[in-house]
Image (cartoon, rainbow, N blue to C red):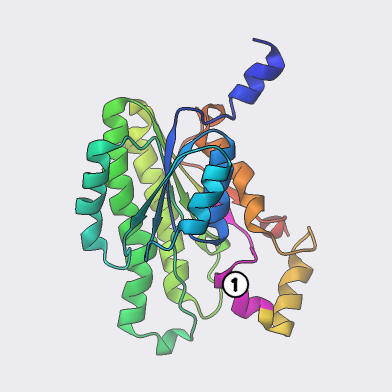
Amino acid sequence: MTADSSAAAAFRLDGKTALVTGARSGIGRAIAVGYARAGADLVLLGRTGDLGETAEAVRRAGREAQTVALDLSRPEAVPESISALLQHRRVDILVNNAGVIRRGPAEQVGYAAWREVMAVNLDSAFLLAQACGAAMARHGSGKIITIGSLLSFQGGVNVAAYAASKHAVLGMTRALANEWAARGVQVNAIAPGYIATENTRPLREDGERNEAIRARIPAGRWGEAEDIVGAAVFLAAPASAYVNGHTLVVDGGWMGR
């Protein structure tokens, strides 16, 4: 094997199965298709199971795709569903991507909205990591990647629940990495910058906010979902075998401004 081929192999996912949540669109879909191109088979998880387009894109890349419908706003349903999946399918890579955001002044945030954000962004993410991570640790290998945010570091405006959940994701990542690193499981996170997805549509449609955000990004543009794929492949691949408890920021330079 040449040095070039050895380096390329370090970023391949051949023979692996990845479970990606929130895979219908945006960052989740981009990561799923990117993993397929890197050689992985996919388990695609979405709230309604409307994952046909992503599944077809995975199959066009030459890999298998299984879809799972699971409402992550009901964390109590996660353990049984994932346990059933793991009984007949090994998951080598978990990407906790699914997330919701509810915008509004803190004094107007209802408890139901707060709990919905926490349920999807944190509670279900933990339960998925718990189930998959325990199985990975028994096998002696695995990768868990949770999607954080710039609001894992900052407070934002009118997004108290989202910021709290994304701060918590970083703590969870470090805690799980401490417990499972010695058992062959790498646990990391990605903090995307301002990415053009459905969640950020209200910001992009607000002319003043859109311009203010873009002006602060050194790259001079909003990110695209595909901009996250390279980081996601790296953290899922053998190349990151000694990376643990880390949050990789992919933000066009925002945090360095």
Q: Quadrant of residue 206?
A: bottom right
Please provide the residue range marked out in magenta. 190-204
Judge left or right: residue 117 versus residue 4.
left
Residue 177: in sight, yes or no?
yes
Q: State how many labels appear.
A: 1
Q: Give the image quarter of residue 169.
A: bottom left
- Mark 1, other Cα within 10 Å: few <14 / some 14–19 / many ≥20: few
Height in image: 107 above or below 230? below
Q: Is residue 59 left or right of residue 209?
A: left
Which residue is pictured at 19% across the width and 52% down the height? 80
- Is 183 colored magenta in this rendering? no
Horizontal relation, residue 92 to residue 8: left or right = left
The location of residue 30, given as percent across then percent down, is 58, 52
Q: Nearer the viewer, residue 61 or 98?
A: 61
Judge from the rendering whether residue 179 lies leftward or rightward of residue 57; answer left or right.
left
**At which x and y percent is residue 138?**
26, 29
Residue positioned 36% across, 79% down in the render: 113
Q: Residue at x 32, y 34 (%)?
A: 90
- On the rendered image, what quadrant is the C terminus found in? bottom right
| Residue denoted by label 1 | 200
